[in-house]
Image (cartoon, rainbow, N blue to C red):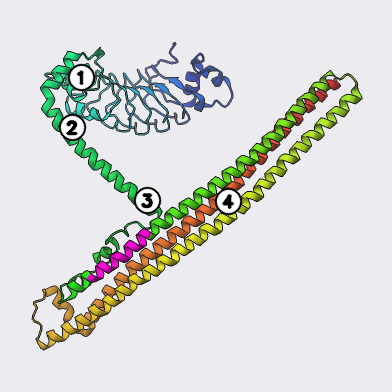
């Protein structure tokens, strides 16, 4: 293909360059026809060739959202950037540029073939998102560390690798090392890897590879466990009861409670605190389990609602299709009759009849749509009542359980205050047998000091409970409000779209009839 432009001066990748490039690719993907149209749609272009353009910086490619193949070789590009929107890209050529670092490829999840041949790259990195990568060309760069090969083990689809011309190729057993660490590789440096090479690699590095596989298995297991935990947490968040399946809330009450932690070393308080904690956690678990059950009920209610809506829409659409099919059958016959008719008054009469039939169809379709609107409105209102009642009941029961947490806190506060005052009296009388830490003794200066300390601890605990309850109530109310609002908005948009479709169809039918009338009149 002829090159578009060749200059010693760096060029800007602007719309003019892109339009010209697309235009010159006329035979491919019909891009030439697109380029000739006013307001070219770059989103329709599937392949783009921009080699030998002296491009310094990748830019203005955001509109090529469906691009599959991009050729940017033989330029003076220094950074990989501006490719974020090219998520459909399968083939990318950035060879013969001035790139030093592999970057900017995080969104190219469909990329299968990547060429970075003849650049200035010294490290293989930042390719993690390229899970479909099959071909990687990195020849004639500055890669000199075998650790780069181990990084490539994560690419399970990689079958072709080129590293020729890098310092790494001078290492002893370079090919055997790569074959050992990348056992699924088929081609290395443009040559097929034979069975003998694979055997030598497996024999020499068997122990090392086995150890590496074990380490990878351990990492993968930990990663899967972490992902499973994260998935569970997200599920709990959707139920608004995250971190209530244990002692998290209780522990958080004491995280910032310095006085409470100090007072926990008083006689009997340790045992009292243990009983308090156990009972508190049981209530939290009750909230958690109840929350998950209610989440499933809300999910079932929502799924049932969507099924009802889809069934109603589908049934209504089927009725509309029958009406249109019946109309079109008669309409085609009428049009044929008009074309064959030579008597002008008869033609006019038939055209009026056709126009009336079109109007009648419009009325029928609009009546069907109005019936559907009324049906869906009733369904939506019923769902809104149900989901609002479910959320209200959930909040009411959670608040009741949270009240039990407060009761436990109040009871513990009373006991702690009683023990603290008793301890103060013993200290004053010199009857305290236990030795208290210095920071705890500072709380027992007088009655006001110890009462304030116990009160401050109590306030912190109640605030934590109140905040967790408020957060739950606020979030589920917000979820309910946004859900219902979205459902209403979606129905409005559906109705507008349907009415527009009906009007467009009717206008088309009427326009077709009008054109026929004009032709016959001529």
Image marks 1 and 2: residues in contact by CB distance under 8 Å: no
Mark 4 or 3, which is nearer the eye? 3
Q: Secondary structure at mark 4?
A: helix
Check residue 40 for magenta coloring. no
Question: Which quarter of the rendering shows the C terminus?
Answer: top right
State which region is magenta: 275-289
- Identify the mark nearer the N-term, 1 or 3: 1
Residue position for label 3? 235
Q: Earlier in the sequence, mark 2 or mark 4?
A: 2
Specify few, some or many for label 4: CA neighbours under 10 Å numbering under 14, 14-19, or 20 or more: some
Compared with residue 92, is residue 420 higher up or lower down, i.e. above or below? below
Q: Which residue is denoted by mark 2 in the rendering?
A: 213
Q: Earlier in the sequence, mark 4 or mark 1?
A: 1
Q: Which residue is mark 1?
A: 166
Q: Are marks 2 and 4 in contact (CB under 8 Å)?
A: no
Tag shown at residue 214: none
- Residue 246 position, x and y percent, is 28, 60
């Amino acid at each position: 293909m002829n090159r578009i432009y060749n200059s010693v001066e760096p060029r800007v990748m602007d719309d003019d360059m892109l339009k010209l490039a697309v235009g010159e690719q006329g035979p491919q993907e019909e891009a030439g026809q697109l380029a000739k149209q006013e307001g070219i749609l770059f989103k329709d272009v599937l392949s783009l060739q921009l080699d030998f353009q002296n491009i310094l910086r990748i830019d203005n490619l955001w509109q090529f959202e469906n691009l599959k193949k991009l050729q940017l070789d033989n330029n003076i590009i220094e950074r990989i950037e501006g490719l974020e929107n090219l998520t459909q890209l399968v083939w990318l050529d950035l060879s013969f540029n001035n790139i030093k670092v592999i970057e900017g490829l995080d969104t190219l999840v469909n990329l299968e073939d990547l060429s970075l041949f003849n650049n200035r790259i010294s490290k293989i990195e930042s390719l993690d998102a390229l899970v479909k990568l099959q071909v990687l060309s990195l020849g004639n760069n500055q890669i000199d560390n075998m650790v780069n090969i181990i990084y490539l083990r994560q690419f399970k689809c990689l079958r072709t690798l080129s590293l020729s011309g890098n310092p790494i190729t001078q290492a002893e057993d370079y090919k055997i090392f790569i074959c050992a660490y990348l056992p699924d590789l088929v081609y290395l440096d443009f040559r097929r890897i034979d069975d003998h090479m694979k055997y030598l690699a497996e024999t020499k590095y068997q122990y090392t590879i086995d150890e590496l596989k074990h380490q990878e298995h351990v990492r993968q297991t930990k990663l899967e466990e972490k992902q499973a935990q994260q998935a569970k947490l997200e599920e709990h968040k959707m139920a608004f009861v995250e971190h209530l399946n244990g002692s998290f809330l209780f522990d958080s009450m004491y995280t910032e409670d310095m006085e409470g932690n100090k007072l926990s070393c008083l006689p009997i308080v340790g045992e009292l605190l243990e009983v308090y904690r156990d009972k508190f956690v049981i209530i939290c678990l009750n909230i958690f389990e109840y929350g998950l059950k209610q989440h499933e009920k809300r999910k079932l209610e929502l799924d049932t609602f969507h099924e009802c809506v889809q069934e109603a829409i589908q049934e209504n659409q089927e009725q509309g299709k029958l009406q249109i099919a019946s109309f079109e059958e008669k309409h085609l016959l009428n049009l044929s009759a008009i074309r064959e008719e030579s008597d002008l008054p008869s033609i006019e009469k038939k055209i009026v009849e056709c126009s009336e039939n079109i109007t009648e169809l419009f009325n029928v379709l609009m009546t069907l749509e109005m019936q559907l609107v009324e049906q869906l409105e009733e369904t939506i209102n019923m769902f809104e009542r149900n989901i609002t009642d479910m959320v209200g009941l959930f909040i009411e029961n959670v608040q009741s359980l949270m009240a039990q947490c407060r009761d436990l806190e109040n009871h513990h506060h009373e006991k702690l205050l009683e023990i603290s005052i008793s301890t103060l009296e013993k200290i004053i009388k010199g009857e305290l047998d236990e030795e208290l830490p210095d920071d705890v003794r500072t709380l027992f200066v007088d009655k006001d000091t110890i009462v304030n300390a116990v009160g401050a601890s109590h306030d912190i605990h109640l605030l934590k409970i109140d905040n967790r309850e408020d957060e739950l109530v606020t979030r589920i109310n917000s979820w309910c409000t946004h859900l219902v609002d979205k459902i209403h908005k979606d129905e409005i948009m559906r109705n507008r779209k349907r009415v527009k479709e009906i009007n467009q169809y009717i206008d088309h039918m009427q326009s077709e009839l009008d054109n026929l009338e004009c032709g016959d009149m001529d």
